[in-house]
Amino acid sequence: MVDVKMSEKSEMDDYVSKPIQKEKVFKTLARVAEKKPVKPSAEIVEDQASTPDAADLPYDREKVLAWVRGNTDLLADILEQAHEVIDSLLAEVGQAVEARSCESLHTSAHALKSVLSNFYAAEAVHAASVLETMGRENHQDSVDDAYVSLCNAVEVLKNSLYELVKE
């Protein structure tokens, strides 16, 4: 309780206690995002000629920007934290695939799917969901191919989101 009071006095946006729980961190980040000031519209007006076609993106651009209220600096902060979590969970999925551990595959793919869904990334979420289902149903056929598809979808997503924050 002392830490919460100290964070309020220091004008911190929020507080997450230890042990750190990934889902709590993301929920806190989302809550803080709602409190952050929105950039003036002139800063987020998009030049239609340089904006990628939404159909070509591995995420829903409009929803992601709405989630952070157009604040790409906040999105960059979220991505910095999410990058480590995504890589860690992807490694857990890979270990489960290698070990042919259905239970571990199910839980790690589910956790990764939850994180990826924050970015409205349909293809990456679907790829994680496929592996989650394979783990839940003890289905090992083509698990290696499904993992490669997930890795590719996640890599494309991360690169594309970093391009968004550079704009």
Image (tube, rainbow, N blue to C red):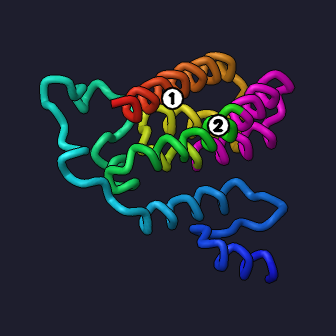
Give the Cα separation between the discs numbered 1 and 2. 9 Å
Q: Position of residue 30 (x, y in %)?
A: 50, 60
Return the residue nearer the eye: 147 or 89: 89
Which amino acid is tagged 1? Lys
Question: Considering only vertical position in the picture, is 76 above or below 99?
Answer: below
The residue depicted at 18 percent of the width and 47 percent of the height is: 42
Front position in the image: 129 or 56: 56
Residue 96, image x, y percentages:
80, 31
Q: Which mark is residue 105?
A: none
Q: Seen in the image, is 146 located left or right of residue 158?
A: right
Q: Residue furthest front?
A: 10
Question: Which image quarter holds the C terminus?
Answer: top left
Q: Which residues are magenta?
A: 88-114
Q: Quadrant of residue 53?
A: top left
Give the quadrant of residue 134: top right
Instruction: Work out which residue is located at the far left of the displayed protein and give it.
Output: 48
Q: Main secondary structure of the magenta part?
A: helix
Which residue is painted at 38% across and 36% down in the image?
59
User: Is 9 one of the magenta-colored residues?
Assistant: no
Q: Percent from the top left, x then y, of residue 121?
A: 43, 38
Q: Position of residue 130 (x, y in %)?
A: 57, 35
Image quarter hosting the N terminus: bottom right
Q: Is residue 12 above or below residue 153?
A: below
Residue of label 2: 86
Residue in view at x 80 percent, y 43 percent: 103
Q: Is residue 109 on the magenta stretch?
A: yes
Q: Quadrant of residue 81?
A: top right
Residue identifier under label 1? 158
